[in-house]
Image (tube, coloured by chain):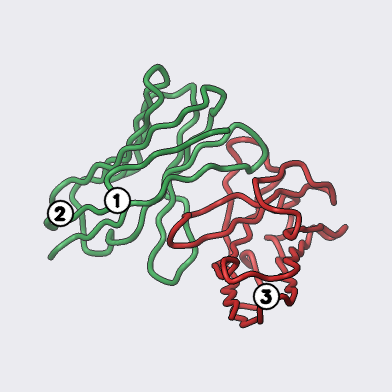
Chain colours: A red, B green
Amino acid sequence: KAGVTQTPRYLIKTRGQQVTLSCSPISGHRSVSWYQQTPGQGLQFLFEYFSETQRNKGNFPGRFSGRQFSNSRSEMNVSTLELGDSALYLCASSLDGTVGNTIYFGEGSWLTVV
Amino acid sequence: GENVEQHPSTLSVQEGDSAVIKCTYSDSASNYFPWYKQELGKRPQLIIDIRSNVGEKKDQRIAVTLNKTAKHFSLHITETQPEDSAVYFCAASDNFNKFYFGSGTKLNVKP
C-alpha cells in the first residue's frame, strides 16, 4: 500500500511569490490534514479536510489556504510568501479523522523562502 | 486552545537504560494522546497512542501512561538501543485530526 505522497519535496521561492503543495493520501483515506514544522515553533496544525470540506483550521493567517478534491487529494497554497514561511510542510492522512484514527505523515515538502 | 508542554527538550541515556519523557496538556476535552518518533530528515511516525479511557498501554519496550486528573502523560522506553535515538513528540487531540504537539524531546542513546 503506497504511503502519503507529497510533491514537490524541495522548493525555493522568493518573498512575495505564492506556492502550491500537493498531497496524495493513502488509498481509502478521506481525511487529510496539514502541519507546518519549524525549529522554533515545532509542529503546528494548519487545517484538516474531509470530503472536500474544511473541518478544522489552525491559527494561521489567511495567506494559508487549502482544498481537497473528490479523490481526497489535497493541496495547500501560501500566497505572498514571507521569510518566516520557510518550513517543512507535512501532510497527514487518516481514514476519516475520527479521534483515535492513526494518522500517517508524508515525507513533507521543504519550502525555503529567500 | 490546547497547550501541550513537553520535557525534557534533550535526554541522553546509556544504552540499556530507561528513558522517560513527560507531557502536560491544558484542555480537559482532549481525549487522544499519540506519541511520534521522528528521525533526522524523516517523517514523524506513530509509535504508541492512548485514549482517555485508558490509564496505561504497553507495546514491547514502549509504554505510555495517562493521568487525566493531573492532565499529564508520559512515554517510557526501557532497554534503550542506539536506534531509539530520534526526536519524540507527544500530541493531544479532541477532534478531527487537529493535534497539538509538544515541542519535542531529542533522545540520544549512547552505545
Please tell me whether mark 2 sits on a helix, a strand or a loop: strand
Q: CA distance from mark 3 to mark 1?
A: 31 Å
Residue in the image at 39% along x and 39% along y: B5
| Chain identifier of the residue bearing label 2 in the image | B
Question: Closer to the camera: disc 3 or disc 1?
Answer: 1
In the image, is B51 to the left or to the right of A27? left
The answer to whether tags 1 and 2 share a subunit is yes
Q: Is residue A51 above or below residue A25?
A: above
Where, by quadrant of the figure, is residue B69 drawn? Answer: top left
Q: Amino acid at mark 1?
A: Ser
For mark 3, what is the residue?
Answer: A7
Residue in the image at 63% along x and 43% along y: B97
| Chain identifier of the residue bearing label 1 in the image | B
**Residue sitting at the far top:** B69
For mark 2, what is the residue?
Answer: B13
Q: Amino acid at mark 3?
A: Thr
